[in-house]
Amino acid sequence: MKHVGRSHPRLGDTPFLTGKAGFVGDIALVDQLHMRVVRSPIAFGRLRGIDAAAAFAVPGLVAVWTAEDVAALPPVGFRLAAAPTLEPYCQPVLAVDVVRYVGEPVAVVFATTATAAEDAAELVALDIDLLAPVLTLTGSSRGFEGETRPAEAATVRKAFGDLAGAMARADRVVEVSVGLDRDGAVPGETRGVVARWDGGRDVIEIWGDARLAPANRDALATMLGRPLAGVEINAVAVGGDFGMRGELYPEDVLVAYAARTLERPVRWIEDRREHLIAADQARAMAATAKAAVAADGRLLALDVEFAIDQGAYLRPTGTMVADLTAAMLPGPYRLEAFRAVGRVRMTNRTPAGAYRGAGRVEATFVRERLMDAVAAATGSPPLEVRRRSFLTPEEMPADRHMTTLGVPMTIDSGRYQSLIDQLTKRFSLELVHRRAIDRRAHGELAGVGTAVFVETSAAGKYEHVTLSVDPSGNLELVTTASELGQGLSTLLAQIVADIVGADPERIRVTHGASTRLGDGVGTFLARSSVMAGTAAQYAAELMRDKILAGAEALLEVPRERLTIHSGRIREADRHFGTALELADLARKMLPGGPLAGADGRGLVTEGWVEGEGMTFPYGVAVAVAEIDAMTGLVRVPRVFIGYDVGNAINPALVESQIATGAVQGLSSALFTSLDVSPAGEPLRVGLTDYLIPSATESPSVDVLITEDAPSLTNPLGMKGAGTAGVTGIGAAVAAAIDEALQVPGFTTHLPVRPVAIRNLLRKRSGKSERG
Amino acid sequence: MKHVGRSHPRLGDTPFLTGKAGFVGDIALVDQLHMRVVRSPIAFGRLRGIDAAAAFAVPGLVAVWTAEDVAALPPVGFRLAAAPTLEPYCQPVLAVDVVRYVGEPVAVVFATTATAAEDAAELVALDIDLLAPVLTLTGSSRGFEGETRPAEAATVRKAFGDLAGAMARADRVVEVSVGLDRDGAVPGETRGVVARWDGGRDVIEIWGDARLAPANRDALATMLGRPLAGVEINAVAVGGDFGMRGELYPEDVLVAYAARTLERPVRWIEDRREHLIAADQARAMAATAKAAVAADGRLLALDVEFAIDQGAYLRPTGTMVADLTAAMLPGPYRLEAFRAVGRVRMTNRTPAGAYRGAGRVEATFVRERLMDAVAAATGSPPLEVRRRSFLTPEEMPADRHMTTLGVPMTIDSGRYQSLIDQLTKRFSLELVHRRAIDRRAHGELAGVGTAVFVETSAAGKYEHVTLSVDPSGNLELVTTASELGQGLSTLLAQIVADIVGADPERIRVTHGASTRLGDGVGTFLARSSVMAGTAAQYAAELMRDKILAGAEALLEVPRERLTIHSGRIREADRHFGTALELADLARKMLPGGPLAGADGRGLVTEGWVEGEGMTFPYGVAVAVAEIDAMTGLVRVPRVFIGYDVGNAINPALVESQIATGAVQGLSSALFTSLDVSPAGEPLRVGLTDYLIPSATESPSVDVLITEDAPSLTNPLGMKGAGTAGVTGIGAAVAAAIDEALQVPGFTTHLPVRPVAIRNLLRKRSGKSERG
C-alpha cells in the first residue's frame, strides 16, 4: 500500500492522549532550584538601584542575581549574521542601567520552592527614574528622550525595475495606509526550561523546546564560553510553538548559567502573565503602499514603505520579519518595478519575534488591501483585478530579481488563477457570494472577501537524517527537524515507508535532541517537510538499495525481481512461498558480518540535503463576514482556503494545519491584541483579557488542497504548509467587512474594533459614539 | 609537539579529583522506587513457595514480584551466539522452581525508600526443599541429584598436529595437575543501575556501566520486546570494571522492566554482601597438562584437559573463558602438536563470567607450571627450557592452525627471548636472583620465579567514531568504546591531536551513551586502544584533509606547504606572519556554507574499522617471593614485568595498567578466594573476609615496555595492554615459592595457603599441623 498521499492517522499521539507526554513542567530533578524573574514594572526608565535585602528573609532563598552577577554573559545573540550596527539593540540577559519595557528581566531569584522564589521576587525593590516611553511607531519615528541608540535599528530595502518610469506611465496610482496591531502566539503551554550541570562530564543538560536545538545549543555554548559538546538540549513535548517558543530568551541563558554556577538543577516555568508581557510578540506594523496601475487595469509597480514595531530589543530573529515582509510584498503579481523600504523601529514594548506566518501575514495584508483599493478605484471586481496581474504558469519559474534571507528569490511554480477557479467551483463560492448580496438586500450586513497569497518555505540551509533498521525489523529515523504537533513524524514515516516497503507504525521518528544530530551541526527553519522530508527520502532510497542488495545475496534472486511490502521481501511474481522478513535480514546484515553491505555498517543510511533555493507555495483565502449592527461585532461564520502544497504527503495533516491556522489568523483579525496603557502597562495579562476565540467564535473552515504546482526544488515536489491557514485570513476578513459595510477601504487596521464599526454605523444613521 | 608516545597526563581526571564525577549511586530521580532482591540462602533446592504477606506490612512497599510476575521475560541471553544446547543453562531473571546458588534472585521488592525495600525483602519467606549441592569440579564431574540438565554444559576442543606421534617420539612426557580457586573482580564500587521509562517517547532510559552499552541495549530490547530505539543506556562514572561490571545481569533486566511496568523510576544499588555472592565470579578451574619433550629439551606437544567451574548458570559471556583458555595454552612456544579439551562444568556456586585476563591467566598458569616441571624433570634452568621452544621472530606471523572466538589465530609478531634479555639487563635480574640464592644460603626462604605469556587483543569486530571541530576550535570524538579509568580518552585524544594538529586538552572524548553510537550499532570487546584508536586515526586523517582543503582555499597556499600546530594553520616556512585559527576555519566551514567541503558537512568526519584479526602482545613476569617460616605467609616484595605493546601511545598509562594489574594478580595468587562452607554458604561476604591486599602487601612493580613487535593488524602497530599485569603474575609467584621452598612443583593451586607451607616446613622439621 502506498502511504504518501494518504491521510494516515498521526503517529505518536498516544502519549498525549494517555497523559504520558512529558512537557517541561513535568520535569523535576532532585535538589532543583526554582528561578523567578524580577521584571521591570516600568516601560522606560533609568535603573538606579536594586535592593534585595528583604528577599533574603524568605526561607528557601538561595541567591539573587542582578546584572553585575551575570556580567560575564554577552547579550542574547542573533542567530542570523549579526551586523555590528545591530549590537546596541541586543538584549542584555539582565537589564543594565536602563529598563526598556514592562516585563524586562532586571533580577532573578533562586529558591528551593517555586512559591519561595515568587515571594522573594516580589520583595526585590527596584529604584527606577521614569523616562517618557515611546509606545507607537508614530512615537518612535520622533525618537526617544534619554536613549543613545537611534530609534531605527535597521532599514531593509528591496527593489527592482524602473519605479519612477512605471509610476510615470501609470494610468493611475492608488495608495493605502494600513497596519496591524500587536499580537502574539500565546500557546496553551507557557515557556519553561530546566537545566542541570553534569559535573562528571562537564555538560550543561537542558530540557525544553527543541525546535531550534542546534542553533540554540551553538548560541548558548558561545555565550557561556563552552565547547559545543558542553551543552546538550533535549526535546520535550510542547503545547504549541508557532515560532514564539524555541527562540533563545534571556531566561534560557539564565537557567543554563545558573545550573552551572550554582551547581544545582534549575527550573523555570513562566506563568501566563509573564508569558503575555515577556515572550516574543509580533505583527505590529504600519505601511503606506502605492500601486501604479495601467489603463488596462494591470499592475505596473508597487512602492511600499513600512515600519515594524520591534519593541525594546532585537530578538535572535534579527531583522528577518522586516526582510520577509519586504520580499513577500509582490506576492503572485507580475510587476515591472518594485520598491520596499522597511524600517525596524524600536519602542518601549516587549520585543517582537517571529510568529507563524512572519512577514507573509504582514505583506499579504498590505498588498491585498491595496489590490482591493485598486478594484474600488477602477470599478473592477476584486478577483478580476487580481486575475489581470497574476504571473502565469508559462512565466514560471519567475525570477524576482531580489533576495530574501540572503537567498535569491525565484518563484518555482504556481497556477494562481486555476486555484481560484477550483476553489470557486469546489465550494460554490458564487452562491456564497450571492447569498451575502441577498442578505444585504434584506438589510443585513454581510460580505465576502478574498485574499491571494504566496508563501515561502524550505529556507533552511541543510538537513540531515539517519535511518536504521534494527534486528527486530523496526526502523528509526533521527532528524534535527522538530515535531511540534504538526505531524512531521507521521509525514516522514510515510515517505520512508513507501520507499523502504515498511509499515509507518514500525518507523520511529526521533527528533530534537541536540546530541543526536547526525553531523553535530544542523538547523531547522520553518517547513520541515521539504528539507527533512527530502533528506528522509534520500536515506530511504539508500536503505532500499542496501536491503535489496542483502536480499539478493540471501535469496539468490536478482534484485529487479524483488519487492518489499510491510517489511517482507519476496519475488515480485510469487504470491505464495517464503518471504524474507526485514527483521531476519537486519540480523544477517549486522555490522561486521559477511552481509553487512559495501560500507560494512549494515542497515544504516544517512540522508543529507542542502538548500536548493526556496519553494513558493500559494493560496487563496475567502472569508464571509457578518456584522451585528447593534454592537459592531464581526462574526466570520465561514472561511474557504485553497492551497497548493505541491505534493500533499498527508492531506489530513495539511488540512489540519490550514484549519487551525485560519482560526489563529482570525483571532488576530478580530479578537486578540496586546494593548498597553498610555504609560506602557500591558492591559492583556491573562486569558480573561486576551480574548482567544473559542469554538463559538471559530468559523467553519473548508479547505481545498491542490497539487498543481509541484516544487522544482525537491524530488517529491513538496512545499510547506505550516502557515498556509494564517497568512491570508486577515486580508480576506478585512475585505469581507468592507463589503458587508459597503465601504471600500474601511478596514485599514487589524484587529477590527467593534467601536469603529459602531461609530460608522451610527454616523450613517446620524448617531455617534466615543471610542 | 608530538603527543603519541609521550606520557601525557590523563585527561578528564578533574571531576574525579573534585568529587563531581557522577556514579550510578549519585543518580536520584524524583518519585523513584528502590529495588531490593530477595536472594536464595540455599545453594541447591526445590522452591516450594514464596510468602510475601509479611512484607506488605512495611510502609512504603509498592510491589513484590516473583517468577510469575516476570514470566514474560526470557532468561538472560547470551551475547555470543547462543547454541540451542546452551539454553537450559541460561539464568531466569527470577528463579523458577529450583534455586541453584546462594545469592540467586528469587523475588524482588520495590519500595519508596531503600530501607523499606531492605526491610520488606527480609520479610519475604521462602519455602525451599534442600537438595545436595555440588560445590567442586570433582563433585560436578559426578553429576547432580535432582537436576535434569547435564552437569557439563559444553566442551571446548582445540587441536592441531599429530599428537599421538609427537608423544611417541618424545624423550619424556612431563605431567602436572594444577588449578585455581574462585576469585572475583571485586571493584571499589558495587554494581547498580537506575532506569526510567519516558512515556512521552516510549523509551526506557538506563544509567549504569556502559562498557557494553550497544550489546546490552540490544539484549535488553530483545528481552523486553522493544525496538532498539526504545532502550537507551547512558554511561556513568565507574569505580572499577575489570570485565565483571557492564555484563547483563538479572538485576539489570528487572530494573528496566520494572521502570516500564510500574511507570516509576527504579533504582538498585547492591551492597557488598550482594556483590560478593551475586556478581560474576571467575578463575576456578582445574587442569591436567602433559608436555612431550624431545631429547634436546625442546617441546614437541602439549596435551591439556581442563575443567572450568561455571557455577550455576552460563553468563552472557557464554563459553568464552573456556575457549580462550584452550586457545591461549600454547603461549609463545613452537609446537608440533597440540590438544586441549575444556569442560564447562556446572556447580551450585555463583555463576562465573569474564574477569580481567579471562582465559589467559588460566592458560598461563597451567602452561608455565608445566614448563617449570619440564625444567625440573630435565634438570635445565627454567629460562633455558623456555628459550629452546620460543617461536622466533623469523617464524612470525605464526599460524596457530586453530580459531578462538571464531577468529583464526595467527600470532602477528613477537620477540620473546629479546624481551627476557632486555628485562634481565634493565633490572639486573641476575643480581636479583643471586641475592635470593644468597639468602637461601643464609637459611632464609627466598626465591625468584618467571612466567612468559602471550596476550590477545582487538577481538572486537568493528568500531566507529565521529570526530568534529566546533566553531570555538574545540574537537569532540564520539566513540562506542568506554573510558573505565584506563585512560582511553587520553590515548584517543593523543592520536587525534598528532594527526589534526590540535592540543589534546581541546579534544573531548564522549563515550558510552548508546544514543550516540554513530551507526546505531557498535560493540566493544576488551582492548579498545587498538580498535577505537585505529578508528580515531582514520577519522583524524580525514579531518586533517578537510582542514587543509579549507585552509588551502582560504589562505590560497597549496596544502603541501601548510602545517597545523596547536590548532593554528600556517605556511610551513613562515615562522612569523598570520596563522589561521582552527576556530575561524571551523566557522567558515560550517555546513551549508561555500567552504563546507566536498560532502557539504563542514568539519565532521567518521572513522570506521572492521576487525582484521587479533593481535598478540606478550610479556614476561618475574616475581620475588619470601616466606615466613613460622607462619607460612608468602611475601612478594618485588615484581618485574616486561611487556611488548607494539606502540605505546602513552607509556605512563601502559605502566599504570601493568602495575595495578600485577597487584590484582597477586591478590588472586596469595590472598583472595571466594570460599564457601560445605553447604555452599559463602564465607567471604565483606571486605573483612575477602582480603584485598593493601599497600603493605603490594609489591614494588618495575615495568619495562618495549615496542619491538608492532602489530601488523593496524597502522599504528598498537597492541592492547589492559590485562598485561595480571596474566603472568600467578605463575611467576608459584615458581618463586617453589624455588624459595626448594620443592619443584610444590605450588599446584592458587591462592597459596599458608597452612600448606607450614605443613611442608613442619614435616621437614618433623612437626606437622592440621589444615
Image: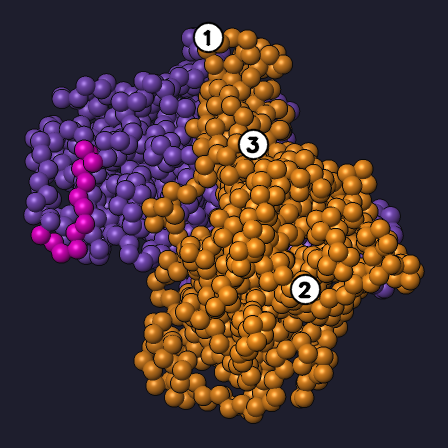
Chain colours: A purple, B orange
Q: Indicate yes or no whether the magenta region holds residue A44.
A: no
When asked about the image quadrant of residue B347, the answer is bottom right
Residue B752 visible, this orientation:
yes
Q: Are marks 3 and 2 on the same chain?
A: yes
* Range shown magenta: A57-69
* Location of residue A568 in the rendering, given as x and y in whole percent from the top left corner: 75, 58
Residue type, mark 2 in image = Gly
Q: Residue at x 17, y 55 (%)?
A: A60
| Above or below for B110 versus A33 | below
Depth check: B417 or B561 in front? B417
The amino acid on which the numbered mark 1 sits, given as a three-letter code, is Gly
Distance of label 1 from label 3 (alpha carbons): 31 Å
Image vertical order of residue B544 relative to residue A102, above or below: above
Q: CA distance from mark 2 to mark 1?
A: 72 Å
Whether residue A62 appears in magenta in the rendering, the answer is yes
Task: Residue A539: give x, y in percent of width and height.
Answer: 65, 42
Number of numbered markers: 3
Q: Amino acid at mark 3?
A: Gly
Specify the quadrant that holds the C terminus of chain B: bottom right
- Closer to the eye: label 2 or 1: 2
Q: Which residue is mark 3?
A: B5
Give the label on residue B745, or none.
2
Which residue in the structure is indicated by mark 1? B577
Quadrant of residue B596 within the rendered picture: top right
First of labels 3, 2 by sequence position: 3
> Relative to B149, is B494 on the left or the right?
left
Chain holding disc 3: B
